[in-house]
Every structure is written in C-alpha cells, then in structure tokens.
Image (cartoon, helix red, strand yellow):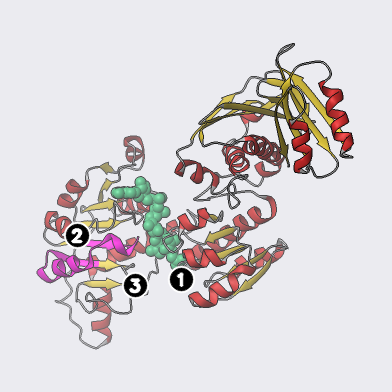
Amino acid sequence: MPKVLISDKMSPRAAEIFRERGIEVDEKTGLDKEELAAIIGDYDGLAVRSSTKATAKILEAATNLKVIGRAGIGIDNIDLAAATNHGVVVMNTPFGNSITTAEHAIAMLFALARQIPAADVSTQAGKWEKSRFMGVELAGKTLGVVGCGNIGSIVADRAQGLKMRVLAFDPYLSPERAQEIGVTKVELDDLLRRADFISLHTPLTDKTRNIIGERAFGLMKLGVRLINCARGGLVDEAALKVALDTGKVAGAALDVFATEPAKESPLFGHPNLVATPHLGASTSEAQVNVAIQVAEQMADFLLTGGVTNALNMPSMTAEEAPRLKPYMALARQIGGFAGQLTRSGIRAVSIEYEGHVAGLNTKPLTAVVLEGLLKPNLESVNMVNAPVIARERDIDVSEVLHEREGDYHTLIRLTVTTETQTRTVAGTLFANRAPRIVEVHGVPLEAELSDHMLYIINDDRPGFVGALGAALGKYDLNIATFNLGRSVKGGYAVALIAVDQPIEQEVLDAVAGLDYVQQVTHLSF
Ligand SMILES: NC(=O)C1=CN([C@@H]2O[C@H](COP(=O)(O)OP(=O)(O)OC[C@H]3O[C@@H](n4cnc5c(N)ncnc54)[C@H](O)[C@@H]3O)[C@@H](O)[C@H]2O)C=CC1
Ligand SMILES: O=C(O)CCC(=O)C(=O)O
C-alpha cells in the first residue's frame, strides 16, 4: 500500500481522499528540515503547500518518493531540478485557488483606493479622522496587469466590472486572447507609464525577479498604487521603500515578500503600506479545491500511473493510463533492447509510432523508450528524468507519427544513431496486450522477450543452427524459444534465443567462437 506524508496544513479532505482510495497517510506539519529528512524515506508521496521546502537534501533522503503534490500553484518551495534528477514527479493544482487569489488582489485594490486598513485602525482607536482618509475612485482608472495568465485574467475581468480600463503586459498573451478578455496588450514600459494601479501576476523567474525595481518606479505615474499577490521577489523591496517615502508610490499592497515568513521588514509601519501574510489562496473554498485536487492527482499517480498537472513529465490521464500500460511495457522493452546493445555514445534517437499507437498520447511512451535505452548505463534513470538526461547529453530525440497501419495494426520503431552505427528495433502488441519484437536491424522476426536471452548476428550459412544447438546443449542450456530472421538469402541473420537458465560468460565465449558468428550479446528483460 503506498504511503503519503502531508507536511503542511491542508484541508482534511486531502487525508480523507487518500484513505478512501486505500493509501496510508500521515499528517505531520511544522517539521524542521532535519525531522523531515529523517522520515521522508518512508513515503511514496509528499503533499505540501508552501511551508515545506523540498530541497535537494530532502530529495536525497527520499529514497522511496515517487510524487510531490503541491496544493496550490507556485512551486518555488520545491527543487524541481533535483526532483526530476531523482525521478520524482512534481504536480501542482493550477486552477484551484485562482479565483480566490484574484479576489484577494481586488480586495487589495479597494484597500489601497480607500485606505481601509489604516482607516479601520484609526476609527477603532477613537480618532474619527474623516478628512485624513480621502480616497480615489476606481471607475475610469487604468489598471496595469503584469502577467495575464489564470489569475491575471480573472483580475482583469473583475476590474472591468468595476469600469476600469485594463492594460496587460505578458509576452505569452496572444492578441486574440487579449481581445477575448477585453484587455489592451502593451509593452511593460508603456504599462508602467500609463497605469494608475499595477497588479503583479507572473511567476518568479530569472526574467521577472525585481521586475518592479528602481527603473520601473522611475517610469511610473506620480501617485501610482502597486499590488503584489504573486511572489515576493518580483518587487525590489528597498526600491519600493524609497518610492513610498518620496510619494512616487501612493500605496502598496503586498501579500508576498522576498523572505517568508516576513516577520520584519523595513517596509513595515509605513502609513501607505497594506500587508497580508501570503493569504492569496486562503479561503475555505480554495483550500478544499486544492486539497481535493492534489489528493486525487497523487492517488491516481500512485495507484494507476495517471499523470495530471505534472511540471516535469508528460501528462497521462487516469483513463489513458490503463490503455497505455501495455504500450509502456513494449516501449520499455524496445528501449532496453537497443540500450543493451549500445556500446558507444548515442547521438540521435528517432521513435516512429505507426497505426493504432499513433492516435494515443505518445509523450509518456517516448519517455519510457528513453528510460529503457539509457537504463543499461545509468541505474538511476526513470521515465521522469530520462528526457532531461537525454537533453543534457545532447541526444537529439524525435518522434514521427504515422496514423496509417503498415504490416502491423500497431507498431513502435526505434532508431538509435550512435557514434559508430545506426540500429533499429521495432515491436508490436499481440492481442492488444502482449509485447513482441518484430524487427531488428531491418530483419523481420517475432520474439517474446524474457529474462535470459541470446542475441546473435551471424552469416546466413547452412549448419549454423545445428552448431549453435549443440554448443548450448554442451552447457546444459535449455532453449525456450528460438526466433530467427535474415536480411536476404546468404546475407546476415539475426537470432533471438530465450533460454531457461542464466547465461554465463563461457557460454557467450563458446557461441562467439562458432563459425559465421559476427556478434553475440546476452540480453535480459
Ligand atoms: N498569493 C498567493 O497566495 C498566490 C500566489 N500565486 C502566484 O500567482 C502567480 C500567477 O499564477 P497564475 O496566474 O495561476 O499563473 P499562470 O501561469 O496562469 O500565469 C502567469 C502568467 O505570467 C506570464 N509571464 C511569464 N513570464 C512573464 C514575464 N517575464 N513578464 C510578464 N508575464 C510573464 C505567463 O505568460 C502567464 O500568462 C504565480 O506566481 C503564483 O505562484 C498563485 C496562487 C496563490
Ligand atoms: O498555499 C498557499 O497558501 C499559497 C498559495 C500560493 O502561493 C500558490 O498557490 O502559488
């Protein structure tokens, strides 16, 4: 039974779903990094929000971990590269808290426009400072949205409901989408110059870090108001302090900070600052949404292999997973076949999908072919990290889809080009479930792969098969299946022979010494 650790505060629905689906679950929140490292090795899954830091060290200790689920959107608390290297799938829940977070941004917009937090403190202190809190209307003002994805576009929609004009800066926003959601797509500098309010909704990346800094403040209108409900590092906090002090920025509302938890900050106490402790996603609705989603996604993965919303591997729905399962076995065998024969550096890999399989989701199959191919030389490879390892090693990977059927109803053909040669292996499914190798090196044959196999290439000459049988008999090796094919009469032949016992080196030496043998290799599946 798979075992999951929930290490951040999460709606109880997550634990209920894991249990309902037969997964053992522990809820241990507030662990420090040593405590987490000490226990993480016991778990197949880790469910987190933003407090748990899934660092390279934690992943090192996570010897059984298969999946990390983030009940939320941002995954800056998870070392994605380290997770990928360890073959751990990382999933998030990209939509469950978008409305809630957009609503928080709109709440911040109002809080700034009418200084509600400061007015509340003053009024409850008995000051009744009616003339101190003169606000501004939102209607007719310009909102600049930086990052117009899920949350940014909801903010834009709500702002238009308030009769605001919305400018959007997002390099990945298409003009059609901009038109559809009623925003004007502009460049960043244009937005900074024209907006009365600016709301940030991008992820934190190398390109967006400090996107709002001294230069950006310099371009903004006098009296602009800034909202950040995305990620702390987007705003240069020291530059913001100067902009607030000089009055360039009339108000800033921050839900997120460069360092969290933000227990102290030079910004704190500024009369024009509104601050909340990373509450963007904190509504009961959003928390139930993300908890249900993350638990369902993780349970699907652990129980069926279905992959949804993964950030480091191709998606595969729980419905697709059983359909792809026999193909995964075939893909692993084809990759493993070629991988066990490969002795020099791989330059290129081409995978052709023909017939029925070409209509399926082939991305996970390609990942599995690569896993099989690289495994003989890299013990820690799996389908999550195989594409990354291939990329790191400059292996050119291509997929070709032929929906028409060839000789077989469905076929996967792998061509591997190494520094010294090009090799092809193709396979099909018999009765839609049993993997069979049907072509090696362009030679047709039909072989079921098993634990102990001999792969032989020999000159196509009479007497070879008899000599081979006698040689194996001498070592008491019982032949289970014998599959033979040849290029052309008198050309070269390929034999795939399954035997019942492990194959010792002396057997390989004896076969290699037979007349006409060009190559003999022990394969195991
Ligand atoms: N405060 C909170 O509690 C929460 C914060 N968030 C944060 O909100 C942010 C946005 O989330 P979503 O809208 O769901 O993400 P999303 O991926 O749907 O949208 C992000 C948008 O930013 C754009 N973008 C990327 N690089 C950019 C750049 N250099 N300049 C301008 N735009 C760029 C992308 O094209 C995309 O459209 C994320 O950082 C997320 O972590 C999300 C949920 C809750
Ligand atoms: O889980 C939370 O409270 C934070 C949510 C968040 O920042 C996100 O989903 O990116």
| Residue 383 percent coordinates (x, y) | 59, 46
Residue type, numbered disc 3: Thr
Residue 221: quadrant of the picture: bottom left
Query: Which one is earlier in the sequence, the residue at label 1 or at label 3?
Result: 1
Q: Which residue is mark 3?
A: 276
Quarter of the displayed picture in which ligand 2 can be seen: bottom left
Residue 51: mark: 1
Which residue is at the far top? 489
Q: Residues within 10 Å of mark 2 (few under 14, many from 20)?
A: some
Query: Which one is earlier in the sequence, the residue at label 1 or at label 2?
Result: 1
Q: Is mark 2 within 8 Å of ligand 1?
A: no
Residue at 55%, 60% (x, y): give it: 68
**408 or 99, nearer to the observer:** 408
Q: Which residues are magenta?
A: 225-252
| Residue 394 percent coordinates (x, y) | 45, 38
CA gap between label 2 and label 3 equals: 21 Å
Q: Is residue 243 visible?
A: yes
Q: Is residue 101 visible?
A: no
Q: Is residue 297 above or below residue 23?
A: above
Q: Is residue 229 magenta?
A: yes
Q: Is mark 1 within 8 Å of ligand 2?
A: no
